[in-house]
Image (spheres, rainbow, N blue to C red):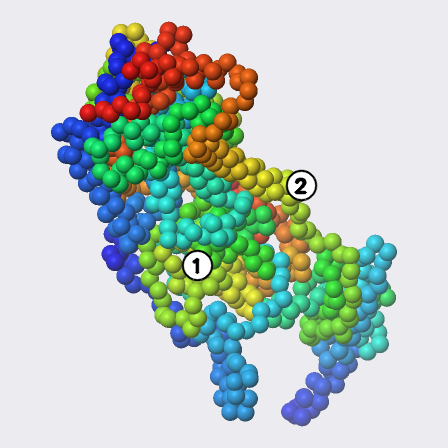
Amino acid sequence: MTVPPDRADLAELPQVADSAGGMSRRQALLSLAAAGTALAAGPLVGTLVRASDPADPTHAGEEPLPPRRWAMVIDLRRCDGCKKCTEACQAKHYLPPGQEWIKVYTLRDRTGVEFNIPRLCMHCEDAPCVRVCPVTATFVDRDGLVLVDQDKCIGCRLCMAACPYEARYFNWTEPKTGPSLPTKATPEFPSPQQRGTVGKCVLCVHNIKHGELPYCVEACTMDAIYIGDLDADVATNGTETVRLSTFLSENNAIRLKEELNTRPRVWYIPGHGEDLLW
Amino acid sequence: MIGRNTLAALVLVGSAIAPASLALPGQVAAADPPARLQLDAEQRDDGSWMLRAKLTRAGTVQSQQTVQFLQRVDFFGERWVPLGTAVTDTAGVASRLYSPTANGVQELIARLAASDGTFDSGPIEITVSGAVPAVPAEPPVLPVVGAWAFPVGAAILFLVWLSLAVIFLRAVIGIARPISGRSTPGAPTREGRMESSFQETSTTE
Amino acid sequence: MVAVAAEPQSATALHNAAFRPMREPGRWFWPLFAALAALVALAAVAYGYQLLAGLWVAGYNDRAFYGIYEANLVAFIGVSYGGALVSAVLRLLNLPWRAPITRMAEAMALISLLVGASFAIIHLGRPERIWQLIVFPQAASPIVWDAIAISTYLAATLIFLYLPLIPDLAIARDRLGHSSSRPRRAFYRIAAVGWRGTPAQRRSLNWSVGAIAILIIPLAISVHSVLAWAFSMTSRAGWHSTIFGPYFVIGALYSGVALVIVIVALFRKAYRLEPYIGLRHFVSLARIMAALGVVYLYFTFAEMLTSGYVRTRDEASIVAALLEGSFAPAFWGFIVGGILIPLVLSLLPAARQVRWLVLASVLVVTGMWLKRLLITLPSATAPLIGDVWGTALLTWVPILISVGATAAIPLGLMITFRFVPILALDEMAQVDAQDAVGPAFEPPASAEVVR
């Protein structure tokens, strides 16, 4: 299989760092705890207790936490366009370089102010992409998130046409796989992806259902990305915690293309006085 | 000459006396007794709650202090959600109206961030029901059309395929059947004309 | 008005003409067949390469996710409408001049429908999973509606091709007695289902043909409407337009009638059918084509006017790109070459010759293909966030496949008319029987054998 001529960098995908530099301190502590627990309890408990495997991002075999009504808030006053969120997402999901599930646009608004805006899948509560899929490959999961079952996807790309946010990507060529994972690809962790199917941000559902932050929230050095629960009315960027409703109303948070009535879950807090129109 | 011990004793005594003389009621200085917060929640008729936090130090109420109200949540670990602040009045009570936006059991504390440390009240639990979420989920659009669209469409489709089958079978069966006397007595003229033209032309060639 | 163009011919000559493609097609047949088959084979090779390497070889990328294949899907299914118009609508309007060309038109409709539907498979990323459309479809998806509409219309087209063919197959059964092979005779005998031309049989047949001619019209409208709505049931500027259903249907009729003219002209010349298909047929078809072209121009104007006048940001950028920007040469080339010039050629008395009308039709078919590309590409490459347009690449894979698909239509027709009479003999006889002038030729007696 030839590598497309404009994708010479496909030959070398970034590898997931398996040293502490790639994991957060929390994950490193968890892995230490897990190792210790396994060592201590292993002979006694045997296979009854299965320690969570930090090398397995799919958290296979673990019971998920109860469902939440997820939301994200991105504070554009803080975003500096460093794209660490994109790098982390691409590395950990083994994405090819052109496929940016969270993509940072640098735009200039009507008054000439330049601003950065990370765009991820909005996981709309009334998602147009879910409506048009002919084989129910794009579906809404228990937590209300929009996922893609790449075993079902026939590659018709009507969802890409329907998405108003350009949030979906297609695997036009055979995706390079990363280091072999302990479990096969699932809609929650669609890696390695399949050629001829659609991929997009999964809101790190594989993490958030097990109490771990999405990769972009963790990676953001400016603490600009928040994840929240609309029902519990709370949001956090990993460091600070806020009451979601007051955070949104006090900072005049808006959603993109509100008039399309897709009811996206991602709010943006505009700053620098820009009007978020470009 | 002041010896080292004397100096220490002087400092000790001074630090004990000085705050007492300099301290006005409510001002905190080093080596004050620890603050004690007592949180209380009263449900009102409209479903909101009045949170009251009483701040005392060694029995003396503290006024003009900013008290923060927090809710404990289990969201990617244990976290504290700030619900707002209030300043203690002359009775040492900070009051804040809290309109919950989530239902269920909530654990609340009051917190004082003072120069000598952070003091939390004991947690209280309130049970919230009937709270309206700040960003409510919206009902689907066009529910009636949505409910009827599929049955009506399926019915139309079924009728179309039925018609196609009838059209095809009627022709093929009607033609393939052996020629029987299907003509009704007093047949319309059109049929008669066609029949005669058929016979007429077949004899001319 | 008689069904036959020139002086009355005997039944023998008519049958000779209708059966000529089956028995003595001419020296050009096999070389042309080989050439067309080679083009189709090349297309298959290109598709095989695409299956192995992935859709990127077709020039797609994430900001140009729809392109030539989707335009072809619309174009090839669109041209099949010429058959529906000529066979069904002209029959219901009882226009007798349709009789010599209905067979060619209907066969062309079937073949171009099949070719067009194959593009629905070619543009998929995982075509081997198409069976899922049957097992777990989502009823709300326009592609499911597409699949249902196309398969229903395909069934109707097959029925509409077959039923009027039964009497002609009976003629073939009776006349090509010992001169054809045993399997062939068996085929005609079985397919003719015992047609003898009796009044009872005639009644059954006429009822069904009339019914399917009526039923196929809303089915045809539904197919292209649903195909249009696959685009306009998204929020993309340029696609999200209420006129898309009628727009595509009129466009399909326009390009379909044009292709009927081209096909009829080609096969008429190849099989020497001039006595039965004359200039008047082309003039009548060209007038219909001109009328449809004017309606299409009107719809296009309405689209551009309403988008361009209100000028919301996304709509305005598409209109600007079409009228004054990067797509402008193609757009204005289409208006002039695809609508205005054919309009003039169709109506100008001085241009009332077969060759000019065929030229006009070729311009229409080509122009309408280009127009489908102009519908697909700008909205697919327009930016939704920011202002950077995508670019689609033109690679050899979609070119080869498109050329092969175009070659498949005459190839399929050549194959079809080796088995099926190219003229609708029975229909021509029926039309003449209704004629007040009287029959210009005699319907065949079953006993006669043509040498």
Q: Residue at x 28, y 54 (%)?
A: C52
What whole-number distance in Å separates the C-alpha atoms at marks 1 and 2? 33 Å
Residue A200, position as x, y percentages in the image: 45, 55
Q: Residue at x 84, y 76 (%)?
A: B59
Q: Residue at x 62, y 61 (%)?
A: A68
Residue B200, position as x, y percentages in the image: 37, 14
Amino acid carrying mark 1 in the image: Asp
Image side of residue B59 versus residue A39, left or right: right
Q: Which residue is mark 2?
A: B144
Q: Residue A180 falls in which quadrant of the image? A: bottom left
- Check if mark 1 and mark 2 are on a common chain: no
Q: State the residue in front, A223 or B12.
A: A223
Q: Which residue is mark 1?
A: A151
Amino acid carrying mark 2 in the image: Val
Q: Tell me which chain the residue with mark 2 is part of.
A: B
Q: Tell me which chain the residue with mark 1 is part of.
A: A
Residue A90 in sight in this render:
yes
Q: Are marks 1 and 2 in contact (CB under 8 Å)?
A: no
Residue A123, position as x, y percentages in the image: 54, 53
Q: State the residue in front, C148 or A5.
A: C148
Q: Which mark is residue C122?
A: none
Q: Residue at x 83, y 71 (%)?
A: B61
Q: State the residue in front, A212 or A81.
A: A212
Residue B53 in sight in this render:
no
Height in image: C358 above or below C313?
A: above
Q: Residues within 10 Å of mark 2 (few under 14, many from 20)?
A: few
Question: For the residue labelled by badge 1, is the local secondary structure a helix, a strand or a loop?
Answer: loop
